[in-house]
Amino acid sequence: MAAISKRLLLSDLVSSDKIDQVPSNYIRPISQRPNLQHVFHDSIPLIDLHHLYGPNRAHVVEQIGRACREYGFFQVKNHTVPESTTANMMQIAREFFKLPEEERLKVYSDDPTKTTRLSTSFNIRTEKVANWRDFLRLHCYPLEDYVHEWPTNPACFRVHVAEYCRSVRGLALQLIEAISESLGLDKDYISRQLGQHGQHMALNYYPPCPQPDLTYGLPGHSDLNLITILLQDDVPGFQVLRNGHWVAVDPVPNTFIINIGDQMQVMSNDKYTSVLHRAVVNCDKERISIPTFYCPSPDAVIGPAPELVTDDEPAVYRQFTYAEYYEKFWKTGLATEKCLDMFLAT
Ligand code: OGA
Ligand code: NI
């Protein structure tokens, strides 16, 4: 078995040491492995947003509502983010992860409270088994508060990533309005609960892996934020849990995958579920995925929407600030108990 790596980042271990076995600290116990032969190949609803602002809006909103209720996931096409914006974003991510090690390490940190940082796995301070992933995490709204922390190499990094963030934020706001309506709430209700609003993103880099059956890019988890907008390259690896089975959602060009996060589950009082999903790796190809985590600002008070709380359906969760939830999530780690369970109403 290969020795435990002394390198900070997985990509540098993989590219320099030419490893042909997964180092022991990445190997999951047998009962927790991805079981790749048992994964289903299926799809999640693909919703055309072209008519979201036309006479057929009600129909699109209804499709979104059904997808949120039944899947917790959907894909969108004919959205407002230009193809050139996503192509530039993907290209700049690819270039970033190809930079020399010493250049990338300028933004390295294992402190989850840092608002701009490159790190590896999920949370190396708390986890027992590592994940086959490096990631650059950025806070990106309000943009002017964070953009000065971002990498300046590659040269166009800030320009392209800022453009992507602005454009994806527009899509997030449209989706949040539609989801609010789909719950029978005022279209601005959810947006109003988010304080000043927040937006984070990750640039996930999954190197090829010699033994993908033994480890994960990211193990099953739910996202802690409100909604996630996932851009992925053309390499499969993303899977969602549906009726107790893992389902591979293979990439569709020019679409985003949208999922309900924990905060939306709370506000909807469990009408919508923040569903488990994971990333698996493969022997041949590196994979890049870029989730945008749209979220409340830290001071926002989150709880079930009063209109969705009745005698028959009492509040499932207590109120909390997003800061409180965020801290608990990063301390708890992935694939343990669901963080939501720690916020149940008494
Ligand atoms: C995440 C996530 C999936 C992927 O970063 O929360 O679920 O395919 N990523 O990278
Ligand atoms: Ni996720």
Image (cartoon, helix red, strand yellow):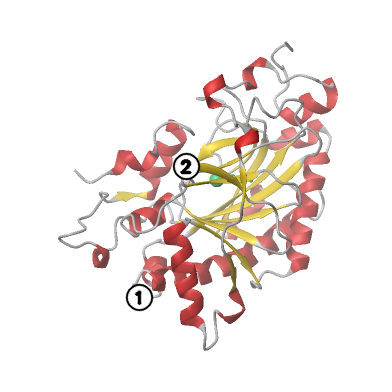
Numbered badge on residue 186: 1
* SS label for mark 1: loop
Of all residues, the one furthest to the left in this rendering is 311
Residue 73 vs residue 262: left or right? Answer: right
- Dot 1 and dot 2 residues touching (CB under 8 Å): no
Position of the N terminus by quadrant: top right
> Picture coordinates of residue 139 (x, y %)?
57, 50
Q: Nearer the viewer, residue 305 or 109?
A: 305
Q: Which residue lies at the image location 43% right of the left edge and 38% below the top edge?
A: 329
Judging by the rendered image, the residue that carries numbered circle 2 is: 244
Q: Which residue lies at the image location 76% right of the left edge and 54% below the top edge?
A: 90
The answer to whether one can see residue 14 in this image is: yes
Q: Label 2 is placed on what type of residue? A: Gly
> Picture coordinates of residue 98 (x, y %)?
83, 40
Using the rendered view, name the quadrant where residue 195 is placed.
Answer: bottom left
The answer to whether one can see residue 153 in this image is: no
Mark closer to the chain start, 1 or 2: 1
Compared with residue 182, is residue 51 higher up or lower down, i.e. above or below? below
Q: Label 1 is placed on what type of residue? A: Asp
Q: Which residue lies at the image location 46% right of the left edge and 36% below the top edge?
A: 330
* SS label for mark 2: loop
